[in-house]
Image: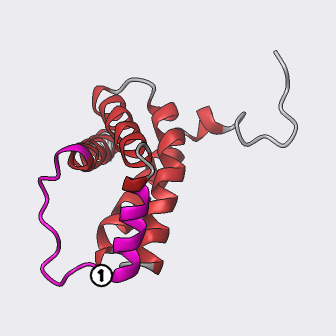
């Protein structure tokens, strides 16, 4: 159990580094079962903005590197939270066949957030004190 936070942090960092790089390099082939039309439409809409795919991929890469280097881990977890929420929503509503990886990502994120709960206390305080 002593090394589990480090293992979880490295796994989560690798997932986001690799998938973030894939946003630029497209080295993962499409799934053999094909991509549902709604998922395809959503992906095309993100690409057509001219910036959104690059923004999300860059965010994933940066957060992945921060997790892998053990720098600003709570910040990386906060930045990744909305990205993870969108990944889960994408797979729940548009491409359920790809849901196992997002579930693992959510579990890693929640475990690490729990591990760093002392740091997140002031962030979720209803009436934070000013210092």
The residue depicted at 36 percent of the width and 63 percent of the height is: 44
Name the residue nearer the viewer: 56 or 48.
48
Q: State which quadrant residue 20 falls in.
A: top left
Name the residue nearer the viewer: 122 or 80.
80
- Residue 114 appears left or right of 63: right
* Pointer 1 local density, CA inside 10 Å: few below 14, some 14–19, many at least 20: few
Q: Which residue is mark 1?
A: 97
The residue depicted at 40 percent of the width and 55 percent of the height is: 48
Residue 92 in percent (x, y) is at: 45, 78
Q: State which quadrant residue 102 falls in.
A: bottom left
Name the residue nearer the viewer: 35 or 105.
35
- Residue 78 appears left or right of 38: right
- Residue 85 appears left or right of 106: right
Q: Is residue 77 magenta?
A: no
Give the residues drawn in magenta, as a range. Answer: 24-46
Colour mode?
secondary structure
The residue depicted at 42 percent of the width and 42 percent of the height is: 51
Compared to residue 112, the image places residue 96 above or below, namely below
Q: State which quadrant residue 42 falls in.
A: bottom left
- Residue 76 appears left or right of 105: right
The residue depicted at 81 percent of the width and 15 percent of the height is: 131
Residue 110 in percent (x, y) is at: 49, 54
How many labels were placed on the picture? 1
Compared to residue 27, the image places residue 122 above or below, namely above
Residue 14 in percent (x, y) is at: 24, 44
The residue positioned farthest toward the top in the image shown: 131
Compared to residue 7, the image places residue 44 above or below, namely below
- Helix, strand or loop at label 1? It is helix
Residue 71 in percent (x, y) is at: 39, 23
């Amino acid at each position: 159990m002593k090394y589990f936070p480090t293992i979880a942090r490295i796994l989560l960092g690798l997932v986001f580094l690799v998938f973030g790089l894939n946003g630029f390099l497209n080295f993962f082939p499409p799934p053999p079962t094909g991509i549902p039309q709604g998922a395809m439409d959503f992906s095309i809409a993100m690409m057509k903005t001219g910036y959104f795919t690059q923004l999300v991929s860059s965010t994933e890469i940066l957060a992945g590197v921060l997790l892998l280097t053990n720098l600003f881990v709570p910040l990386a977890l906060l930045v990744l939270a909305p990205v993870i929420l969108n990944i889960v929503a994408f797979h729940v509503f548009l491409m359920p066949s790809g849901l196992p990886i997002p579930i693992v990502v959510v579990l890693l994120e929640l475990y690490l957030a729990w591990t760093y709960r002392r740091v997140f206390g002031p962030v979720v305080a209803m009436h934070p004190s000013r210092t």
